[in-house]
Amino acid sequence: MNPEITIGWLYPTLMSTYGDRGNVICIQRRCQWRGFAVNILPLDRAATATEIHQADILVGGGAQDRQQEIVMRNLQGAKAEALRQKIENGTPGVFTCGAPQLLGHYYEPGIGQRIQGLGLFDFVSVHPGENARRCIGNLVIEVTAKRLAQELTAMTGSTPYLVGFENHGGRTKLGQVEALGRVISGLGNNGEDGTEGAFYQNAIATYSHGPLLPKNPFLADWLIQTALRQKYQEEIAIAPLDDNLATQAREAMFKKLRVSVPAAT
């Protein structure tokens, strides 16, 4: 059997700020290098609920406030219900910055009206105002979402740390949803409570932008492995790849930020 993966890319022309297409490219290339067939399905304003259901992995990026409003006006009815069903049924995905803000209860911009979200993630996001300091810079977190941390540890042989880059004005406060991780360096969800992102079913919400998966290829592999399991209802082994350059880049960033992480066993 030659596995096939379809990447559903949410609103690529409206929500792909700060290199978020890098996450799509990373998944695509890591599938291709293993000989898997891979399709990129743009889920834009003309997309249907049926097309959303075709996605094996979902990827959503960041956007400016105006673009987020356009997306939320479009993501209604059958399309919203299809996305809800996909996430509730365990379709893996990575949603960056503006995308998870739209999947929460609401996003309140610095100027303008509150944008209601889909309520899939139990959190709210609020921009504190035009004069508030943006959360910008390199980011390191320890993955603390229990099941994800266990599965990544089994894959890599060490405690999972993610390297990323954040650039956001909104602040997110979690409800009962599990945080993706604990901030080691950077600001994370709100710069106050030490959390970053959220994890629900197999969906990852994060403020870390498009370099996330290239900098942490094991996370891309987790998405691929999970997608294959969900689609084919069996474990399909994926061959290891040479990630030496990514490993060196991660180590350089840890050194730059003076972060000490345990070595793989």
Image (tube, grey):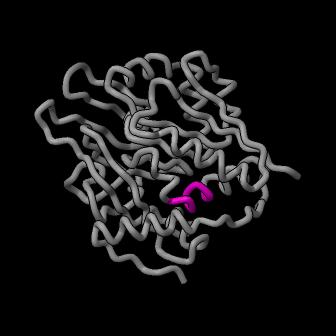
In the image, is 223 to the left or to the right of 215? Answer: right
Numbered circles on residues, count: 0
Instruction: Give residue 4's position: percent from left, percent from top.
Output: 78, 44
What stretch of residues is rendered in magenta? 216-222
Q: Residue furthest left?
A: 131
In the image, is 71 to the left or to the right of 55? Answer: left
Residue closest to the eye, 229 or 20: 20
Residue closest to the eye, 151 or 20: 20
Q: Examine the structure image and report whether residue 198 is included in the region drawn in magenta.
A: no
Instruction: Give residue 80's position: percent from left, percent from top.
Output: 53, 26
Is residue 202 visible in the rendered structure shown here?
Answer: yes
In the image, is 225 to the left or to the right of 127? Answer: right
Q: What residue appears at the point 22 percent right and 34 percent down from the top-left corner? A: 127
In the image, is 64 to the left or to the right of 248? Answer: left
Q: Residue furthest right?
A: 1
Instruction: Give residue 76's position: percent from left, percent from top.
Output: 50, 20
Q: What residue appears at the point 44 percent right and 46 percent down from the top-left corner? A: 205
Is residue 90 visible in the rendered structure shown here?
Answer: no
Q: 63 above or below 88?
A: above
Q: What residue appears at the point 73 percent right and 42 percent down from the top-left corner? A: 38
Q: Residue furthest bottom?
A: 265
Q: Quadrant of residue 265?
A: bottom right
Q: What residue appears at the point 24 percent right and 38 percent down from the top-left corner? A: 169
Determine the main secondary structure of the stretch shown in magenta: helix
Q: 69 above or below 255?
A: above
Instruction: Give residue 83's position: percent from left, percent from top.
Output: 57, 32
